Image (cartoon, rainbow, N blue to C red):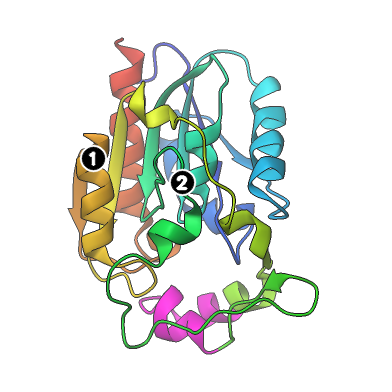
């Protein structure tokens, strides 16, 4: 049930687009929850927040924001009065004054984590073999083929901009910790979740459970939506 018609707005991270949420969108529909995938240009954090705000302007009624990976910084920087709760999916949650890079590089890197560097255009691409090695090691071969084919680079500017007071300081938040994440150290995820005082939901999933474990991602989003519906 979704008595207040809360909309789930799903925000993709780096090296992905809105289609990465397709399995979750299907499952939310089965729970009678409308979902909207917000497109980000991945050109700067400010640009991405502005793009998310434009999506939110089109939606009537309350909203739960869910962000994967880099998008945690984006949803935490949104300011729309319609936002009721935040869901972080193996996501980055910088505090005021921190950058995405500050939290992304915190902790010990997994041995199979890729080496990342911007190209001559200032864009960071994920190496092809990193999709199977670290980004989504639990994905099926055909899923890896699609993820690599549709990847969108992220501008280095996105990860170097300090955030203002994050929204998780003022709204309820949920954090899905990916215990088998090879991109963002799970200990870092637990640390961010603790300082957020988030509702922590820990699963043995990889960095991209929106593709490889959509049932558990949906479960956490539904929990946040239902909690918002009774507020």
Q: Residue at x 64, y 26 (%)?
A: 56
Cα gap from disc 2 to disc 1, whole angstroms: 14 Å
**Residue 9: horizontal and vertical position, in percent?**
54, 34
Q: Which residue is mark 2?
A: 72
* Image mark for residue 195: 1
For the record, the magenta segment spans 129-145
Mark 2 Cα shell of 10 Å, populated few (<14), some (14-19), many (≥20): many
Res. 26 in view: no
Disc number lying in front (2 or 1): 1
Between 23 and 116, the one nearer to me in the picture? 116
Relative placement, left or right, of 117 versus 207 is right
Q: Quadrant of the N terminus?
A: top left
Asked whether the residues under the numbered discs 2 and 1 touch, taking CB atoms below 8 Å apart as contact, a structural biologist would say: no
Can residue 149 be seen here? The reply is: yes
User: Residue placed at 39% from the left, 41% from the top?
Assistant: 95
Would residue 84 appear left or right of 176 to someone viewing this image? right
Up/down of 154 relative to 229, above or below: below
- Label 1 environment density (alpha carbons within 10 Å; few <14, some 14–19, many ≥20): few
Q: Position of residue 148 (x, y in %)?
A: 61, 78
Quarter where residue 154 is shown: bottom right
């Amino acid at each position: 049930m979704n008595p207040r018609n809360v909309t789930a707005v799903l925000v993709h991270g780096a090296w992905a687009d809105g289609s990465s949420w397709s399995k979750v969108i299907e499952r939310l529909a089965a729970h009678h929850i409308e979902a909207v995938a917000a497109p980000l240009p991945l050109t700067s954090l400010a640009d991405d927040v502005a793009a998310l705000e434009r999506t939110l302007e089109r939606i009537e009624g309350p909203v739960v924001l869910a962000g994967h990976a880099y998008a945690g910084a984006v949803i935490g920087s949104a300011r729309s009065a319609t936002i009721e709760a935040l869901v972080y999916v193996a996501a980055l949650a910088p505090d005021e004054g921190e950058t995405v890079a500050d939290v992304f590089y915190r902790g010990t890197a997994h041995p199979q984590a890729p080496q990342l560097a911007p190209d001559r255009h200032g864009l960071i691409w994920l190496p092809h073999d990193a999709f199977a090695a670290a980004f989504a090691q639990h994905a099926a071969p055909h899923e890896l083929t699609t993820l690599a084919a549709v990847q969108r680079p992220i501008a280095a500017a996105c990860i170097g901009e300090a955030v203002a007071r994050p929204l998780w300081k003022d709204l309820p938040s949920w954090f899905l910790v990916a215990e088998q994440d090879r991109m963002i150290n799970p200990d870092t995820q637990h640390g961010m979740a603790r300082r957020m005082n988030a509702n922590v939901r820990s699963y043995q999933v990889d960095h991209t459970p929106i593709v490889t474990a959509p049932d558990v991602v949906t479960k956490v989003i539904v929990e946040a939506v239902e909690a918002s519906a009774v507020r």
